Image (tube, rainbow, N blue to C red):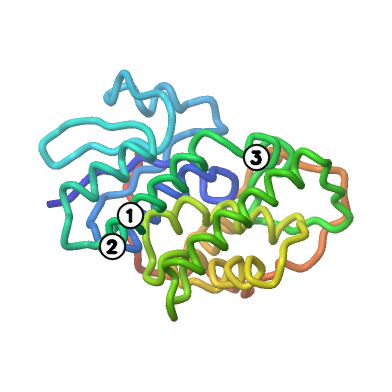
Amino acid sequence: MTYDLYLGDRTYSSWSLRGWLLFEKFGIPANLHMVGLYSGKMAEDLADLAPARLVPVIRTPEGDALQDTLAIAETLAERHPEAGMWPADPSARILARWLCAEMHSGFMALRSACPMNLGKAYAGFEPGDDVLADLARIERLWTLAMERFGGDGPWLFGAYSIADAFYAPVAARIAGYGLPVGEKSAGYVARHLADDAFCRWRALGLTERHDPEPYAMDLPTTDWPGPVAVTAPSGGLPENAA
């Protein structure tokens, strides 16, 4: 059972990263198609998937198109119960869905002020009160999940779940802009940056160039706070031209 997965960009597209992690981290096979998010060709590249107009998009093995990461996550979890995408404990599963839904619809100050950029890290970024409020809310949710359901595991609910895929770009934002978080949250961010799948995604993104650079900021840059990606690794989902 192989899907087709359509994504926009590895360095800047946070929702593309989430969509890819839903397949990569749970061993669900897909043929990968990169579309022209920043070349102006996205509408053309997604024409056969109408009415889809944003990434990520999947086409199921039966030929159905599906847009929106939350809908994709629920569909994959329903179709692949053996993958364990949601926590098995019912109370943990309720909280995990809550965290994903709040990420899906909220934290607009953080998302607006700190666009995901896996190509560089900034020094001297000064978060506003609205961004700090988003961070405080995120930390509260992360702490609740880890303290109630994390056990001895490294992720929000112990084992990696859909909730971790949804918050991977948040971790990248916190790291890339040097945002202030507590020790427990900083450890969770570091685990994302060191995760093999995340590192592969970022390494492949470093092979791509955009002119002009999306979301460029007039700030000094510093070393990326996670592992250094020297070369783009092989493996992962097979990639096709869209």
Q: Quadrant of residue 44?
A: top left
Q: CA distance from mark 3 to mark 2?
A: 30 Å
Report the residue that reaches farthest toward the top: 51
The residue that appears at 35% across and 68% down in the rendered structure is 235
| Relative image position of residue 93 (x, y in whole percent) | 33, 54
Task: Name the kind of residue labelled 2 in the image.
Answer: Asp
Would you name the residue on which mark 1 appears? 93
Would you name the residue on which mark 3 appears? 111
Would you name the residue on which mark 2 appears? 89
* Depicted 64 relative to depicted 22: above or below: above
Report the residue that reaches farthest toward the bottom: 152
* Depicted 69 relative to depicted 208: above or below: above
Q: How many marks?
A: 3
Q: Which quadrant does the C terminus fall into? A: top left
| Relative image position of residue 11 (x, y in whole percent) | 58, 50
The first of marks 3 and 2 along the sequence is: 2
The residue that appears at 25% across and 52% down in the rendered structure is 30
Q: Secondary structure at mark 2?
A: loop
* Depicted 203 relative to depicted 23: above or below: below
Instruction: Kindly check if marks 2 and 1 are in contact, taking CB atoms under 8 A apart as contact.
Output: yes
The residue that appears at 16% across and 62% down in the rendered structure is 82
Q: CA distance from mark 2 to mark 1?
A: 6 Å
Task: Name the kind of residue labelled 1 in the image.
Answer: Arg
The first of marks 3 and 1 along the sequence is: 1
* Depicted 178 relative to depicted 241: above or below: below
Q: Is residue 181 visible?
A: yes
